[in-house]
Image: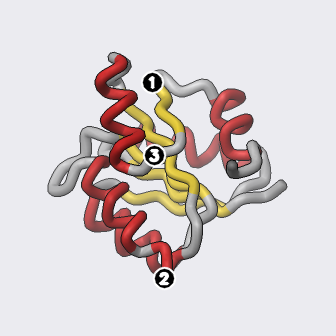
């Protein structure tokens, strides 16, 4: 199923690489490179899924996630997937507390992302 996906990462090469791979799978993609841009893009684009880096400039991924959750009346129900280099249990717990459904450690596996993107919401 085609999904609208917002890819957010301050590493432009990483973001565009993931975006291109997901486009090849048939998804509609938008990319943002910092927290405030991600919030603005989510409001305009209304994605089904947000792949959100945690270590962003200006506003980290946890703060962006909290903003997106508070905007659900305007953007709809969105699946948040944390994308990070931090893989400790405390990092996973912090991501869940911020409103993420999933926590994925870099480097990304596109097949794993596709499974998470296509999994029905609980």
Q: Residue at x 78, y 53 (%)?
A: 26
Q: Position of residue 104 (x, y in %)?
A: 49, 29
Q: How many dots with numbers?
A: 3
Instruction: Give the side of residue 59 with respect to residue 76, left or right.
Output: left
Q: From the viewer's perspective, is the residue at label 2 or at label 1 nearer?
A: 2
Label 2, on which residue?
A: 74
Q: Can residue 16 be seen from the camera position used here?
A: no
- Seen from the viewer's position, the closer of residues 105 and 25 is 105
Alpha-carbon span between mark 2 and mark 3:
18 Å
Label 1, on which residue?
A: 105
Of pointers 1 and 3, the one earlier in the residue sequence: 3
Q: Residue at x 36, y 19 (%)?
A: 89
Res. 38 image quadrant: bottom left
Q: Residue at x 71, y 29 (%)?
A: 111
Mark 2 burial class by Cα count in 10 Å: few <14, some 14-19, many 20+? few
Q: Secondary structure at mark 2?
A: helix
């Amino acid at each position: 199923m085609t999904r609208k996906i917002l890819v957010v990462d301050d590493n432009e090469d990483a973001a565009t690489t993931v975006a291109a791979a997901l486009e090849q799978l048939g998804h509609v993609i938008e990319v943002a490179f910092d927290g405030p841009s991600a919030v603005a893009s989510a409001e305009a684009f209304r994605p089904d899924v947000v792949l959100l880096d945690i270590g962003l400039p200006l506003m980290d991924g946890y703060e962006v996630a909290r903003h997106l959750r508070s905007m659900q009346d305007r953007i709809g129900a969105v699946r948040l997937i944390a994308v990070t280099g931090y893989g400790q249990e405390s990092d996973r717990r912090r991501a869940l507390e911020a409103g993420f459904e999933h926590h994925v450690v870099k480097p990304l596996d596109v097949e794993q992302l596709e499974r998470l993107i296509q999994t029905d919401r609980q």
